[in-house]
Amino acid sequence: MKNGGMIIVGVGGTGVLKASDVISGILLEDGYDVRQSEVHGMAQRGGSVITQIKYGNEVHSPLLARGEASFMLAMEELESLRYSSYLAKGARVVLNTWRLIPTGASPDILPESAAMILRTSGYQVYEIPARDIAFELNNLKVVNMVMVGGLSGIFLKEKETLWENILTHAIPTHLLDVNREAFHRGREWIRKYSEQ
Amino acid sequence: MGEFPKKKQRFMMGNEALAEGAYEGGVAVGAGYPGTPSSEILEFLNCYSGVDVRWCPNEKVALEVAAGAAIGGKRALVTMKHVGLNVAADPLMTVAYTGVRAGLVIIVADDPGMYSSQNEQDSRNYAVFAKIPCLEPANSEEARLFLRTAFELSETFDTPLLIRSTTHVSHSKGLVNLEERKSFPGFDYARDANKYVMIPVFARIRRHILEERMDRIKKWVETTPLNRVEMRDQSLGIITGGVLYEYIREVLPDASVLKLGVSFPLPLQKIKTFTQAVERVVVVEELDPIWEREMRAAGISVVGKEIIPVEGEITPDVLQTVFGVRGNGSETVNFSRLVPNRPPVMCAGCPHRGVLRVLADLKAVVAGDIGCSTLGVMPPLSAIDSCICMGASISMAEGFKLAHPDLPVAAVIGDSTFIHGGIPPLIDAVYNQTNIVVVILDNRITAMTGGQQNPGTGVTLSGKKGHALDFGDLCRSIGVPRVEKLSSYDLKTLRPLLQQAFRESGPTVLIVSEPCQLIRKEREPVRYRITPEKCRQCQRCLKLGCPAISQNGEVIQILSETCRACGVCQSQCAFEAIEEVTD
C-alpha cells in the first residue's frame, strides 16, 4: 500500500466537506490509514476551500506538502489552478467545468481554460459538466456526488460495492436516491470520457 | 460519515474526539461559547447522554459555571477559542489558586495562521501565567486519550487543567478507538471556605500551595508516558508536540523525537537526557518560543526560533524548507497567480449587507465587531472602520465620538456578540451620555461559527426552548433613550432614522432584525431581475457586493439561483430597473 494524497477544492457551500468524508470513508473501508484536514468558520463563507486527504499503511500528517497530491477533485474550475502547487507530477484532476467568477473580479483577466493549462503541464484532466448534470437531476446540491462518481471512475475503480456502501452510510435516507443517481451519472461520464 | 456499526473504531474530527474523550472520562457538565476552531466540541458532546451541555453568553460565564460544577463535585469541561480565554482569564487565574474538587478541564483551541481569528496568540502562555498544567494532543486519537485521563489528572493535582488544541488538531480527522465511559458518580457537596473563598488571608495560603503543587507536577512530567522519546537516527533530535509531531514524522521520518504531550511544565530532566543522546537538537514549537526559553534558562542548549518561524502556521511545507528536505514540491507548478483571490463574502441575501451600505453612504464612522458583519470591511462596502474583540464596537464608538464629537459615529454588532460583550459598553454609553448609534444586527443566530443558538433565540444547545432575550426590553431597561426595531431590509426607513439619530444627544439603539440566510429553510418564491432596457449602468447595485449580482461586459445580471430575494438591490436602484419575478 503506497502512501498517497488527494485534495478536494472548491468554493464554500459546494459540498467539499461531504465529498471528502465519502472519499475518506472508502479509503478506510479499503483498509487504508487516513488523515483528513478541513477548514471551517470564516473561510467557508463563499471563500476558497480546500480539504486534504492523506492515506497509506500508516500516515501521520493531515496536511500535504506541495507536490504530494496524486489526485485533485475540483468542484469549481478556477480553484483547480489556485491549488495546483499541491499536484504531484502526472497527477490526475477531476475537474468540474463550472466557473464561478470571484465577486468583484473582471472576467477579462481570467484564463480561458484551466483544463488546458493543467494538461500542458503534464497532468491528466477529466472534465465533467457536473453542474449541468446536477441541474438535470433538479438538485444543485448533488454536484459534489457527480464529482465523487467521476472520481470513482479513476480511483478505486474496481470497488463498486464499497462505493455503494459508503454512499448508503454517508447520505441521509431521504436524499439517497438523488445522490446515488448523481454518483452514477458522474461515474458513467468519466467512463465514456476515458474511452475517447 | 463512512461510519459502520459494531466497530470500536471511528473516523473522527479532533473536536469530536475531544468530546468522546471527555464523555469517556466521566464529564457531567460542559459549557462554552462558540469560536472557530473550538465550536464543534460541545455540539458533539451534546450527542451523549448523561452530560449537561450548554452555550453560555461568554467564556467567562462558561468557565465560572464549569468551575462551580467541579468545586461542587461533578467533572466539568469548558471549551473556547484562544481569544475566548482572554475573556475567561479572570476566573482562570484564581481558580488556579482554589483548585477543584472534581476534575475541571479547559479546552482552548488556537488558530495559528489566523484562518478565522483576529490574532494568533499562543494559549500555552496562560498555563505558564496561571501555573496550571497544559496538555497538547497531536491527533484525534490522542485528543480522546488525553481527555479521557484529564479529569483524573485534574483531581490528582487538584488543579484546573488546560488542553491546547490548534486548527489542524480540531479540524482534521483520523481513526479513534472507542472505550467505555468511566463511572464517576461525583462528590457530595462540601463547604470549604478556606479553599474556595479567596479573600486575602486565605488566598495567601493557597498561593503557597500553588507553588507546592507545581513542584509535584514537575516530578510527574518526568515520568508520565504523555511525554515520549522515540530514538531513531541520533544525528538529529527534535523536541516537538501537538500536530507538529505528525508533520515531523512525515518530513523527518528518521529523526529522533521527544514528543511533549505535556507542554507545561516541561520535563527538564528528560529533555537534558534526550539532548545528550543526540548530536543536534531543534525545538519545533508553533508560535511563541515558550519551551525554548525555559530550556535555555535551565542551561540546555537548543536551536529553535533561529530557524523555526515565530509567526504563522507551521506546515509540512514550512518544515521541508527549514530542514532542507527536498519533497516532491521541487517539481510542482503553481498557477495560483492566474486566478484572483476569493475571500469569504457575506452570503447573498445576508441581512447585514444593506445596513452596512447605508452606513457607508452616510459616511459614518463605523466601529465594527466580531462576526460575519466584519466582512463588510472589504470593498465595495468598505463600511467597517475597526474590529478588535467581542463587544468592542460600542465602547470604541464612544471613544471615536470623544475624539471627534462632530463626526457621525455608529457601532454595529451582532446579536450573539452583543450578549457576549456589548451590554456593559452600552450601559456606559447611557451612563456617560455618549451620542452614538448602536445598530444591533439581529440575525437570530450565532452565524459565523456555523449557526449556534444563543440567549437571543431562547433555544438552548440541547434544543430546549427557554426564554428569548428581548433586545428592545433590555435596552429600554438600562435607560437607552431611543430604541427602534425594524427589518434589516427596510433601508428606506433605516436611512432617515440613522440621519436623525446622528443629530440627537445620547445613545440610540436600532435593532435591525431578519434571520441569517443559513438558517432560512424555505426559499422565497420570488427572485429579482435586472431589466436591461431600464438599467443605466450606474453600478449602484454592484456596490452592495452581493454574490448574486455580477457584471459581464456591458451587462449587469442577477444570478437567479443565487438570489435570495432580499430586495435590497431593488431599494438601491434609482431607475426602477430591478423587478420581482416569480419562479
Image (tube, rainbow, N blue to C red):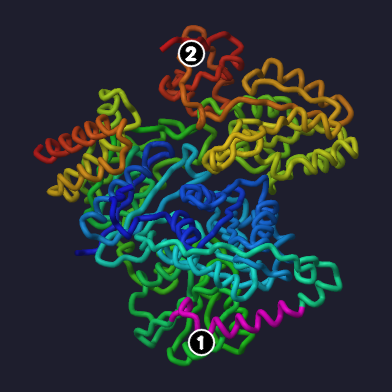
Residue B223 covered by magenta stretch: yes
If you read the primary sequence from the N terminus, does the residue marked by circle 1 or circle 2 appear first? 1
Q: Which residue reaches farthest front?
A: B188
Residue ID for mark 2: B530
Q: Amino acid at mark 2?
A: Ile
Snapshot quadrant of residue A168: top left
Residue ID for mark 1: B270
Task: Label 1, secondary structure: give it.
Answer: helix
Q: Is residue B482 left or right of residue A78?
A: right
Image spot of residue B116 (x, y percent): 55, 49
Report in which chain the residue with disc 2 lies. B
Q: What span is in magenta? A: B208-228
Snapshot quadrant of residue B504: top right
Could you tell me what secondary structure mostly forms the magenta stretch? Answer: helix
Image spot of residue A110 (x, y percent): 39, 36
Q: Residues within 10 Å of mark 2 (few under 14, many from 20)?
A: many
Snapshot quadrant of residue B20: bottom left
